[in-house]
Image (cartoon, rainbow, N blue to C red):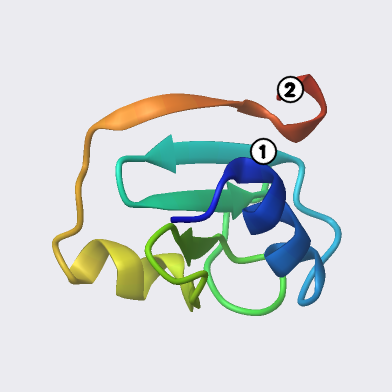
Amino acid sequence: MINFKEALEIINRYYREFDYCTEYADAFVFSKKDYMGFGGFGSPAAVLKEDGSCINFVTYISESHEEEVVREGYISDWK
């Protein structure tokens, strides 16, 4: 299992402009808070806690993963 800090390091390899994170039981989903589209580099992405795999958010939600939010907020506010 990976933690938030490890997930952030993984996602920053691909895209450093995310400013928001939603934690689910099995993944951290990174996004830009005010970005309204899907597709391209600004699209939300999930880092799976089990193995650190990085997948796009549409794939994550379509695979029926846990939907209950554990916590969410701006990345700068996470400790």
The residue beneath circle 1 is 20
Q: Please name whichever residue, 62 or 39, is drawn nearer the observer in this view of the structure.
A: 62
Q: Please name whichever residue, 16 or 78, is drawn nearer the observer in this view of the structure.
A: 78
Q: Residue at x 52, y 27 (%)?
A: 72
Where does residue 49 sit, x and y in percent of width and height? 43, 57
Q: Is residue 14 left or right of residue 61?
A: right
User: Which SS class for mark 1?
Assistant: strand
Q: Please name whichever residue, 49 or 39, is drawn nearer the observer in this view of the structure.
A: 49
Res 23 → quadrant: top left
Looking at the picture, does residue 25 appear above or below residue 18?
above
Q: Is residue 16 left or right of residue 65?
A: right
Residue 18 seen anywhere in this rendered image of the structure? yes
Q: Earlier in the sequence, mark 1 or mark 2?
A: 1
The residue beneath circle 2 is 79
Q: Please name whichever residue, 12 or 52, is drawn nearer the observer in this view of the structure.
A: 52
* Image quarter (top left, top right, bottom left or bottom right) of the C terminus: top right
User: Which SS class for mark 2?
Assistant: loop
